[in-house]
Image (cartoon, coloured by chain):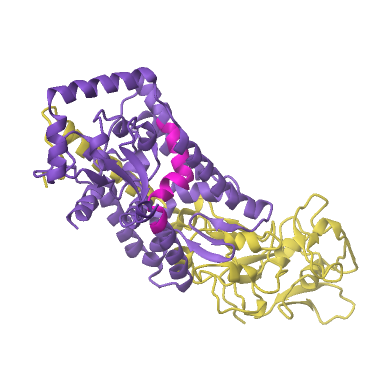
Amino acid sequence: MSKLFGNSSPDGEERRRFLRSVLWGGAMATASLLGFIPVVKRWTERLRPPGAIVEHEFLAACIKCGQCVQVCPVQAIKLGDAKDGYGLGVPYIDARTQACDFSCDALQCILACPTGALNHTLSAKEQVHMGLARLSNPDGCLARQGKGFKGQARGANFPGIHRYAEVDRWKPIPIADHPYDLESCDLCVRECPIKGAISMQPMTDDPADRRRTPVIAADCTGCGMCEMICPAEVPVLTIEPRAVWRA
Amino acid sequence: MKKLLDGFLVMLGKTPVRPETYSPEAQAILDAKRTPAAREERKRLIAEEKAAGHKSHFWRNWRWISIILVNLLFVLSFRIDIQVVEGALTGSRFVGFHMADLNSALQVMLAYKHVVINLVIGTSTVLFLWWLAGGRTFCAWVCPYHLLAEIAEQIHLKLAAKGLVKDHPLHRGTRSVLYVIFALLAVATGYTVFEFISPVGILSRAFTYGASIALVWVGFLLLIEVFYSRRFWCRYICPIGMTYGVVGAFSPVKVTYDMEKCLHEGECRKVCMVPHVLSMTRMGYADEAKMDIGADCTRCGMCVEVCPTKALKFEIKGLSKLL
């Protein structure tokens, strides 16, 4: 062992070097463990891209390369930062800013993933389960107040994009470039990319009552399109990541 | 075989020792070098060389171009969509073929506990490539942190020359211990723990996908290197370098040493990031007349540039004999 620590020196430099090594080596190991804090304390509960496997396995399997970011046609995928702990460099989606609207049709992010952190066995958007939309701000809902909506869903300066099949089958356009004029607001239902995932239901049996409420069905994939398009100040529907549907 | 094993041990942290026996050829050269006349001649040559102010940055310039170009390719592949290497240094596709950084792939497999087939493909490609190119060649020719650390090193040396800072070396075995610790942490926690502090991944992602707060950590490491310990991260901490070092142990691309030409003035060891691999350049430390530089060598070429007698040079094993 003494060989490992070089020739002994009279001035104690060798001993100091050993202590320095333990101290700084320990500091680096400790720094790497700090990534635990955000994970354990759940500072960031992220909506993950389509096909993401169970969260703790997802953080392990992801090689943090961002290839999923590169292929997304609406640039919905972002990478986690230091405050994500071991989620540093791991992809997530901030649905309110830019949701996944399955513009790519073929789950490009899953195909791009080199490690299977995004599950390769998924082949259709209907199989995706990122989370579930929840009615988190019912009082803000225009439909529940029987109101319509006119104008740009998220204002003139909103940078988010969406593929409107009736405008351009292939190319997503800014939501700000696609104003609406709706007698009764149903943006969340209208722009939902999954058939039957959300519907507007009357709030009473009275046919004269124009009030409607959005109802989420089991088919909801949690893509977040409804959260992005909702014109209310605080979105009426928000995605609860990885939530499981219950009747 | 014994050479290889010793090279490994030195990489793991062993201090190189003076050999007890020499090959007959090495012994003859050594005896010739130890005559007073030879000593005087060496002194004269060194003085002459110092007066001439021999300076070359040939390899460094090519290396910097290489680092910038490779990292730029990653950035442009995404930013202007030229699609040559998509991803980051941790994992990518090179014109569609999977590439995975060996250490990142290892961390993922240890944490995830699955053998991911694409990663096996990706690591095989990378393994072959870096075996061919020399293992830690990755560090000196591709790693963006290496370039920043080189600049930090120059600042450190300037400040040290003025007596403003002092180098605080660590034991090189620190890296070996940390290598095991990071591997164990990945297995035990199920997270790719090392990736949280890897400046290589942080930088590579920041170039392509935009700045992150994590860059503060990279800045902190650079500050350590400027003010406290020369080449702190690359010398004593980084497990990526160690992984590639193992790969490069068997590589055909080597820096080789010719004892006969050597003046033993030690300029090479002064510029080297891993001077322990150049221990044979000390008088009496080479047991053979011609030797290969060990696995930890990054093939950066600084010693080749600085050597006035071309005792150190790049060689491609097998090919050099053919040419």
- Give the quadrant of the N terminus of chain B: bottom left
Residue A213 in the image: above or below residue B10:
below
**Does residue B142 appear left or right of residue B278 in this picture?**
right
Residue A106, x across and y down, in percent? 67, 74
Question: Does A134 lie within the magenta span?
Answer: no
- B308 relative position to A188: left or right: left
Q: Is residue A93 visible?
A: no
Q: Nearer the viewer, residue A139 or A87?
A: A87
Residue A119 percent coordinates (x, y): 54, 74
**Which residue is located at x 23 percent, y 30 percent?**
B264
Front-most of A105 and B204? B204
Q: How many marks?
A: 0
Please give the name of the residue rendered at 13% of the width and 22% of the height, measured from the top-left corner: B36
Which residue is more in the foreground, B60 or A94?
B60
Question: Chain B colour?
Answer: purple
**Whole-percent x and y of residue B289?**
21, 43
Can residue B91 be seen here? yes
Residue B200 in the image: x percent, y percent? 46, 48
Q: Is residue B134 magenta?
A: yes
What hue does chain A carry in this figure? Answer: yellow
Residue A98 versus residue B257 in the image, above or below: below
Q: Residue at x 14, y 32 (%)?
A: B32
The part of the chain drawn in magenta is: B131-153
